[in-house]
Amino acid sequence: MAKPFNLLKTSNRSDLRYRPGDNNVVFIKPGDAEYEILRKGFNKRIDKKPAIIALCKNTLGVAEAVQYAAKNNWAIAVKSGGHCMEGFSSNNGGMVINMSAMKNIDWLDNDTVKVNPGCKLAEIYDAILPKKRIIPGGSCAGVGIGGLVLGGGYGLMARKFGLTCDSLHSVTMVDGTGRIITASGDDELLWACRGGNNGNFGVVTELTFKTHIAPPTMQSHRFRAYKINAARAKTILQKWFELTATLPVECFSAFVLNGKTLYILLTNIGKQTPAVKNVIAGLKAVTDKTTFNMPQPLARALKVYYGRQEPLYFKNASAGLYKNFEEINAFIDKALDIVVSTPGMIYQVNTLGGNIQNAAFENTSCFPHRACSYFSELQTYWDMPGQEKRLLEKFERVQQVFTGNGIKAQYRNYPDINFTNWPELYYGNNYKRLQAIKAQYDPGNLFRYEQSLGKG
Ligand SMILES: Cc1cc2nc3c(=O)[nH]c(=O)nc-3n(C[C@H](O)[C@H](O)[C@H](O)COP(=O)(O)OP(=O)(O)OC[C@H]3O[C@@H](n4cnc5c(N)ncnc54)[C@H](O)[C@@H]3O)c2cc1C
């Protein structure tokens, strides 16, 4: 049962006017020095201008900000790492609750760690790997743990340890009425925070994780094929599906078609077993160049995948979760045709499966797509704003191949503003249950954005 905590019992402050330097929260408005920096996110394509930014320093500050927004009837967007691909962590004319100053990482015991959502993934890895512990997070350094875990969270170790949200033990959240709630155990709110609370019904201010023993090393192998056409891309993709279905849970693989160049990554945090060797031999046989690396200490190996950290112009969205190749066999050539003829466009398929499909996780989280062993994403990047229109048109054409051919599962952490039936795509059968939680914790619909719960 969630435990509400009445703000008024802990704070006498009813006066919530703009007060820079406040101990709990600083309100920043257009024209203030920090406004231009704080309003921006990782995606330069998104350009929103909130009426006010609440830079919160603690949970009480968040509660004060929520009450201030309610008084002024401002919609609230919540921002932790600012990596939302469609800018749902900002808005025009409302309040953005910015969590970037809340970055504590505290050990509660040898394997349990409490973090604030403003921590970025690299900061968490840096803090916990020296203790030989790990949380299965994503790969990019700058992604915020807040948005990642609340939408699910997959990465190189998810097949071994589950999604990031499967290691989430408890949360503290300020809801839409300003109450401070804690949720643990079989609480319905915790279930919803494991995959369904991206800024939907409250601001999560503390996240407690059960960590895992960190694997000492990770080994990676890379396979490349050049100047490929759609037919060859399809043949290799089909082989990749067939081979990766046999991978041990310690392995992750990604098929990355970038225009006419194909790159396949295979990582392994376990032993080089015959099953792994068989997959390596199979991938080597269908590609042009193979690079093997020796096992690296985990902390160093993870850094290889940290990615670029400065803001970029891009569009990246979920392009379907699939159970197997048969789901896309009949139409994938149409999508591959567009990708191989569009420099700057990337179609990527990542392995899920393994312990993500553990029945215990299925029951305790609202992430609805565990039966799908593969997650695909579409990406496109550009440098000059003038390139955007053409690339986005192509992007949309590829997406229509998937949506028009019955792909029914999409990952909420890779949203696409053009998905019309997003409640079903992101949340499947769990949408109604999530709406009931929304009604309980945010009855006034203070937390709202283009694809927030309650609008479906
Ligand atoms: C370069 C890049 C790499 C990525 N790599 C991976 C990956 O390897 N694995 C993976 O699973 N995903 C990955 N993602 C997707 C990522 O999980 C989502 O973009 C995630 O939502 C980002 O979280 P954030 O806190 O950085 O973003 P934000 O933009 O701050 O927030 C994202 C969403 O979560 C909500 N939110 C954030 N903080 C809170 C909070 N404290 N309380 C309530 N709601 C909150 C926001 O309102 C918003 O809807 C990647 C994204 C990018 C851009």
Image (tube, grey):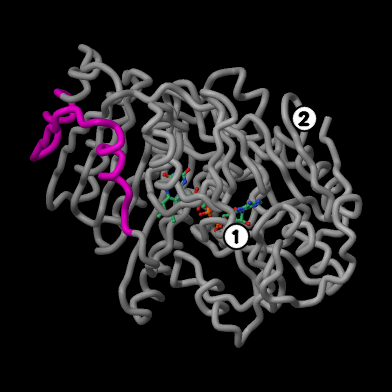
Residue at 75%, 68% (x, y): give it.
75
The amino acid on which the numbered mark 1 sits, given as a three-letter code, is Lys
Where, by quadrant of the figure, is residue 22 drawn?
bottom right
Which quadrant would the N terminus be assigned to in this image? top right
Q: Which residue is mark 1?
A: 79
Residue 220: in magenta span: no
**Left or right: where does residue 176 sit relative to residue 420?**
right
Crowd tier of the residue under label 2, counting other residues whose Cα lies within 10 Å: few below 14, some 14–19, many 20 or above: some
* Magenta-colored span: 281-308
Q: Position of residue 326 (x, y in %)?
A: 41, 31
Query: Front-most of 75 and 400?
Result: 75
Query: Front-most of 266 and 127?
Result: 127
Residue 283: in magenta span: yes
Compared to residue 255, the image places residue 215 above or below, namely: above
The amino acid on which the numbered mark 2 sits, given as a three-letter code, is Asp
Q: Is residue 239 visible?
A: no
**Left or right: where does residue 291 sit relative to residue 150?**
left
Q: Which residue is mark 2?
A: 187
Q: Position of residue 281 (x, y in %)?
A: 14, 23
| Callout count | 2
Q: Earlier in the sequence, mark 1 or mark 2?
A: 1
Q: Position of residue 390 (x, y in %)?
A: 37, 73
Furthest-left residue in view?
A: 289
